[in-house]
Amino acid sequence: MPTRQPVEQMLRDLPPQQREILVATFFRRRTTREAAQQLGLAPEVARTRLYNAMCNLSDMITTGGRERTAARLSAASARR
């Protein structure tokens, strides 16, 4: 069974934009709209970043590895 990464490490492995929206919503207990306003983002952008962050964290938790998440991040960057 693979060793699971601590939550802090998983957060560090996220892109900075995804990490900041997670911190603003979950750890600072703001709504997505409040976090968007604080970060100077459109609400739709904040929701998209939060969704992508949650997908990446889910991958990290279920696979226990960075390879799949790294591939997803590379694919997402290529689409932009």
Image: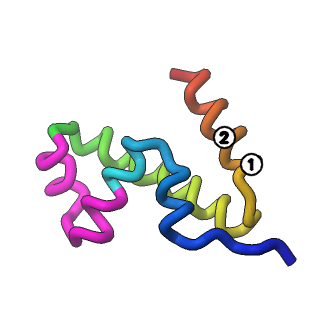
Tell me the number on the disc at residue 18. Answer: none
* Residue 29 position by quadrant: bottom left
Q: Residue furthest right?
A: 1
- Tell me if residue 49 comes above or below residue 60 in the rendering: above
42 displayed left or right of 58: left
Total numbered circles: 2
Q: Which residue is mark 1?
A: 68
Q: Residue at x 67, y 42 (%)?
A: 70
Query: How many residues crowd around disc 1 within 10 Å: few (fewer than 14), some, or many (20 or more)?
Result: some
Quarter placement of the N terminus: bottom right
Q: Name the residue type under label 2.
A: Arg
Give the magenta-colored segment's residue range.
22-39
Q: Name the residue type under label 1.
A: Arg
Give the x, y percent position of residue 33.
18, 54
45 displayed left or right of 10: left
Give the x, y percent position of residue 18.
41, 47
- Tell me if residue 32 comes above or below residue 46 in the rendering: below
Distance of label 1 from label 2 (alpha carbons): 6 Å
Relative depth, front residue between 65 and 57:
65
> What predominant SS class does the magenta segment belong to?
helix
Give the x, y percent position of residue 6.
58, 72
Q: Secondary structure at mark 2?
A: helix
Give the x, y percent position of residue 43.
23, 44
Q: Residue at x 76, y 63 (%)?
A: 63
* Residue 59 position by quadrant: bottom right
Q: Are marks 1 and 2 in contact (CB under 8 Å)?
A: yes
Tell me the number on the disc at residue 72. Answer: 2
Q: Residue at x 13, y 49 (%)?
A: 38
Whether 30 is among the magenta residues is yes
Q: Residue furthest bottom?
A: 1
Q: Secondary structure at mark 1?
A: helix
Query: How many residues crowd around disc 2 within 10 Å: few (fewer than 14), some, or many (20 or more)?
Result: some
